[in-house]
Image (cartoon, helix red, strand yellow):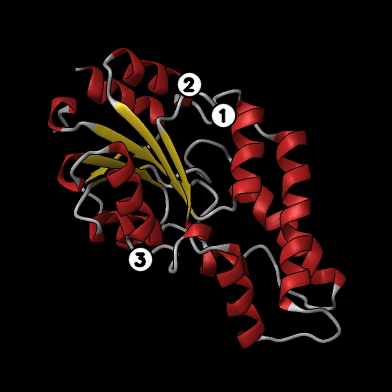
Amino acid sequence: MIKLEDFEAVIFDMDGVLIDSEPLWKIAMEEVFHSIGCPLSRRDFQHTVGLRIDEVIRYWYAKVGWENCSESEVEQRIVKRMTDLIHQNGSPLIGVLDTIAFLKKRKVKIGLATSSYSVLIKAVLETLEIEHEFDFVRSAEDEVFGKPHPAVYLTVADRLNVSPLKCLVIEDSLNGIISGKAARMKVVCIPEKTHTPEPKLRVADFTFNTMTDFLRAIEQ
């Protein structure tokens, strides 16, 4: 059973939690990798869910490699395409807006800790019209290590002035869950629906099918 009164802050991941962006990431990466002659498919990208985009590119360069295009250029092209896709297709996942409104009403601090870059955070928050709802927002691009390292969650807790033990994390991927647990926070998992079912997601403290289900649980 989950009790909201046990927590002083709720920290959201972004991709796959606030916005159904995982399919958009796969579209952007597939298009860019194909354009440089690298035949990776959307199914392949399930192996790198939850990593920073620079870490994703480094992983695939080591795994399959390509020529005539630097890792940095590939990264810039993917981020540009992703920004366009967010503005064109971005919408909040079910229950997100109601959950944020409920937390604000209960005066619970709200944070955002994501592997996505700041330019993409800006695109998502503007597109969903929730840019003023968060007490602190942090991109793992500003940390030495991205998820599954706990740094981004620990930074958000520190800036919210809340003990990690009083923070509840909402995640959708195994790397994110590991990150939150390593930060000594309780973790809710709302699995992203386009992922292959991952039994290891059970390491989360709580699991819900949708954000609406999570909201119903904390309302009680």
Dots 3, 2 in contact, CB < 8 A: no
Q: Is residue 194 above or below residue 70?
A: above
Q: CA distance from mark 3 to mark 1?
A: 27 Å
In front here: 89 or 148? Answer: 148
Q: Residues within 10 Å of mark 1 (few under 14, many from 20)?
A: some
Q: Which residue is mark 1?
A: 92
Quadrant in the picture for the N terminus? top left
In front here: 216 or 92? Answer: 92
Mark 1: secondary structure:
loop
**Of the residues tagged 3 and 1, which is closer to the observer?**
3
Residue 192 numbered mark, or none:
none
Dots 3, 1 in contact, CB < 8 A: no
Q: Is residue 150 visible?
A: yes
Tell me the kind of residue under disc 3: His
Residue 97 numbered mark, or none:
2
Q: Which residue is mark 3?
A: 149
